[in-house]
Image: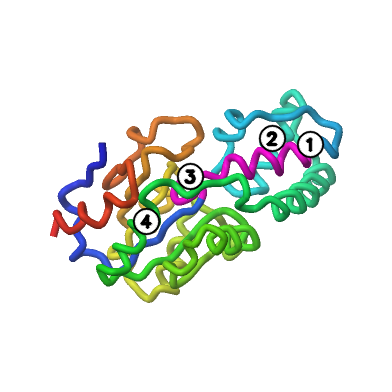
Amino acid sequence: MSRLLPSLALSDLDAVIVDLDGTMVDTLGDFEVALNGMLREMALPAITRAQIRNMVGKGSEHLIRSVLQRVRGGRAPDEALAREAWERYSRHYLAVNGQHSTVYPGVAQGLAALRAAGLRLACLTNKPGAFAGPLLASKGLARHFDLVFGGDAFERKKPDPLPLVKTCEALGFMRGRTLMVGDSSNDAQAARAAGCPVVLMSYGYNHGESIDEVDADGWLDSLADLPPALLAGT
């Protein structure tokens, strides 16, 4: 059930930063097709969607290395193998980007309501920018955002706080008045370290761990629940 801590209210916020994979769009289908296309070309065993689910969240490079290690019996890939895999994966992902993914219920309504409430929105994801922008556009979500930053936009990725710090600077608002909305401990850790309040979606990936155990200011079953919950706290 959706719940926000009483300390979080619309009057305390100027902007919202929203994660992409597992927060707005269920992209496991795209990951599954692209990764298995990569593995097939490399004559490596296939990987299941359930296995992929627990590896998503720390960027495509980390995902590819984790997949390679898994299908190779625990042997970590060297740099040459990781580069080859990245090139093959990128080609496959760009070919299917958005075709096997779905927007979670309530996302479009929630984003529209947040903008109607006067908040500026930014999408901040560990997904490469070349993947993130087209995905948002294909799902009709790009129009809600003032800014979009991929995982290659800054020197480090979430859970490092730097991407949130830089995004708040680009939005022009204080970190304490900018809400992070995500689906995993990566988002929560980055937000806490940056000094941003954070709300987590209950349906996301979170590396196979319970989201209820992650330190946050709220937990939602639908992004559409966020605007009315924030107004209730005002």
- Comparing labels 1 and 2, the label whose residue is closer to the camera: 1
Q: Secondary structure at mark 4?
A: strand
Instruction: Look at label 2 and name its amino acid.
Output: Val
Q: Secondary structure at mark 3?
A: loop
State the image quarter where residue 234 is shown.
Answer: bottom left
In magenta segment, residue 5: no
Instruction: Look at label 3 and name its amino acid.
Output: Gly
Residue found 48% across the figure and 38% down from its top: 205
Residue found 64% across the figure and 48% down from its top: 60
Question: What residue is pinned by disc 4?
Answer: 180
Q: 33 or 129, which lies in front?
A: 33
Q: 204 or 105, which lies in front?
A: 105
- Residue 65 in percent (x, y) is at 70, 40
Marks 2/3 in contact by CB < 8 Å: the verdict is no
Which corner quadrant holds the N terminus? top left
What whole-number distance in Å separates the C-alpha atoms at marks 3 and 1? 23 Å
Q: Is residue 56 left or right of residue 87?
A: left
Crowding at dot 1, Cα within 10 Å, few <14 / some 14-19 / many 20+, comes out as: many
Which mark is first along the chain, 2 or 4? 2
- Residue 233 in percent (x, y) is at 14, 55
Question: What residue is pinned by disc 2?
Answer: 67
Instruction: Look at label 1 and name its amino acid.
Output: Leu
Q: Is residue 128 left or right of residue 145?
A: right
Question: What residue is pinned by disc 1?
Answer: 39
What whole-number distance in Å separates the C-alpha atoms at marks 4 and 2? 28 Å
Q: Which mark is residue 22?
A: 3
